[in-house]
Image (cartoon, helix red, strand yellow):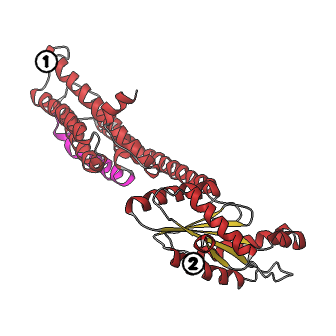
Amino acid sequence: MNWLSQFFFGKVDFPEKEEFREFQYKFLILLQIFGAVTSGLYVFLGHTGALGAFNTINMSVILAHSILLTLFWLTLRGRKQFYLPIAWLTTLATAVDLFSSFILVAADEVRILWIVVTIPTVFLVLGLLPGTIITVLEIFAIVIINPHVVMPLSPNALVTVVISMIYAIVFYHAYNGKLIYFFTSMRSSNDQLREMATRDLLTNVLNARTYYEICDNQISVAQRQRQPFSVLFIDLDHFKLVNDTYGHAAGDIVLKSVAECLTRSLRASDALGRVGGEEFSVFLPNTNADGAVALAEAIRRNIEMLMPSTGEQILKITASIGVARNSHSEQTMLDIQKQADQAMYRAKAAGRNRVSSIDEVVA
């Protein structure tokens, strides 16, 4: 069925936050196609005599309406950026067609229903405020035009129509408000679920899976643009001792404090992930070895000065940090992460609470 959808709607993509606009776009196109076909069929039946006597001017308006809806569909198809102007033009063309029938087709006693039943369409296609304004204008137009048509509505019928349209305004205003609220709530829920799926629940930094996915994308960009990048591997010193001595609640406080410290130390373009129990990794795009080592040293000092409190104890925390940089264009995140890991273990072996670069290890 993809080919059928593409035929009607064209090649068009809607981001996840445009669900309601996608609904409006497809709904409008289906209305245009339906309106063009039914208007064309009405004109055909009129010319065959199946409808009895007909008004020539009205038939010309209906035929023009069918042609315009077809042109609007072809213009909008695959071009979502034209939605609003095409939606307004479609609404205007349909209003002219319907009022033409109201004025010129006296033989149809219930022709006013065509105007009434299009109210929800206006609300769905254009929104709450435009729908309200257009419906109010239609009410005034009906009241003003009615005395001058060939077969005007009786006073009782006119009051019934006006009350029905006012009721429709109230009803569809509430309905559309709930519909938009539904889409907004659904989008908010999806955002929350996506956030939960990509974040470490304790520290709120990226989880390992999401972090490595982002790093792979960043590496591809860096390789295309021939830019340097570096990776920091951060391991908290003697973290098991904190858990064993003060409990896991204290360990959680330490992890949160370190994550906040790392977040404050990084640029918006950097990526930070928790990749192990007490292990963090930082991807630094467009950063050479010297810049990465300088940042790692600043982070090391900031962690050393944290002194997180459990309420009863002030804990002294330090970290060992390994630094690696891209050394050739084919290097993957797995390769550079292993090098940063090796450098970190060298920092551990040298006494902890220090920074070590893979260049130093190789040398």
Q: Residue at x 87, y 69 (%)?
A: 247
Report helix, strand or loop for mark 2.
helix
Which quarter of the picture shows residue 99?
top left
**Residue ranking furthest to the front:** 363
Q: Which mark is residue 293?
A: 2
Report helix, strand or loop for mark 1.
helix
**Residue ranking furthest to the left:** 56
Which stretch is magenta? 128-150
Dot 1 amino acid type: His
Eyeballing the image, is 308 above or below 173? below
Return the x and y of residue 105 as percentages of the image width and height: 18, 28
Dot 2 amino acid type: Val
Q: Residue at x 19, y 14 (%)?
A: 50
Secondary structure character of the magenta stretch overall: helix
Quadrant the N terminus occupies: top left
Q: Nearer the viewer, residue 192 or 278?
A: 278
Eyeballing the image, is 237 above or below 214? below
Return the x and y of residue 265 as percentages of the image width and height: 58, 78
Disc 1 designates what residue?
A: 47
Q: Is residue 56 visible?
A: yes
